[in-house]
Amino acid sequence: MPSRWYVRPFVHLTMSLAALLAVTTPAAAQAAPPTEATGPRYINPPGLTRPSGYTHVVVSSDGRTAYIAGQVAFDSVGQVVGPGDFRAQAAQVFSNLGRALASVGATFGDVMKTTTYITDVRNLGMLREARARYFDPARAPANTLIPVGALARPELLLEIEAVAEIRPASR
């Protein structure tokens, strides 16, 4: 069993270090309350349906990353565009993603990662055609494709969420 003399110097060293930090650290740096400018920004862009219980776009505290909630084929008033028509829904989903990106000064070229939820993998070819119209194949974002049994409403066929880099000129 180790003797107690090992514990006491450690306690004194820890207490001394805490006292030293308290003396050498300016009071403003010790207890600086977070300001609104340093927190995340929550954005619900015009042209997208009004969300209930979530935010369409959240920008990180450092202003470098935008997290875009899953976009579906809703028009600006929440009506489904193209029920049963995958191509029409894909066009609306990408249009909504474009609005969300534009709200933070980003483009499809700034998207680093997408997560795609699809209700029928037989529509994968049409999804790839739609993606090719918006993303440069040589610089396509990382993507996870998840087949699902259903989305939030039964007539929805596709949902895509994204993470984008916000370039300094856009911040």
Image: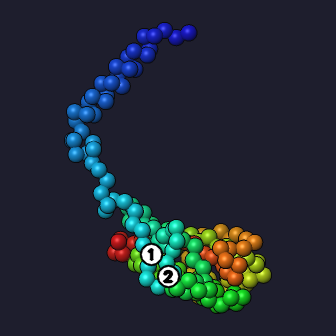
The correct choice, above or below, for 136 with respect to 67 in the image is below
Residue 70 position in % (x across, y down): 58, 73
For label 2, the residue is 48
Secondary element type, mark 2: loop
Give the image quarter of residue 25: top left
Q: Residue at x 60, y 79 (%)?
A: 72
Point out the image quarter for the C terminus: bottom left
| Residue 129 marker | none
- On the question of residue 72 being in view, the answer is yes
Distance of label 2 from label 1 (alpha carbons): 7 Å
Q: Amino acid at mark 1?
A: Asn
Report the colour scheme: rainbow
Q: How many marks?
A: 2
Q: In front here: 30 or 141?
A: 30
- Are circles 2 and 1 on residues that touch, CB within 8 Å? yes
Identify the element where label 1 is drawn: loop
Q: Position of residue 31 (x, y in %)?
A: 27, 44
Q: Where does residue 164 sit, x and y in percent of width and height? A: 49, 71
Q: Say which residue appears at 62% left-offset and 70% top-offset.
A: 115
Q: Is residue 170 left or right of residue 137?
A: left
Res. 165 visible in picture? no
Q: Amino acid at mark 2?
A: Leu
**Viewed as shown, does residue 95 lie left or right of 11?**
right
Going by the image, does 154 lie left or right of 74? right
Mark 1 nearby-residue class (10 Å; few <14, some 14–19, many ≥20): some
Residue at the image position 68 percent from the left and 74 percent from the top: 151
In this figure, which residue is indicated by the disc labeled 1? 44
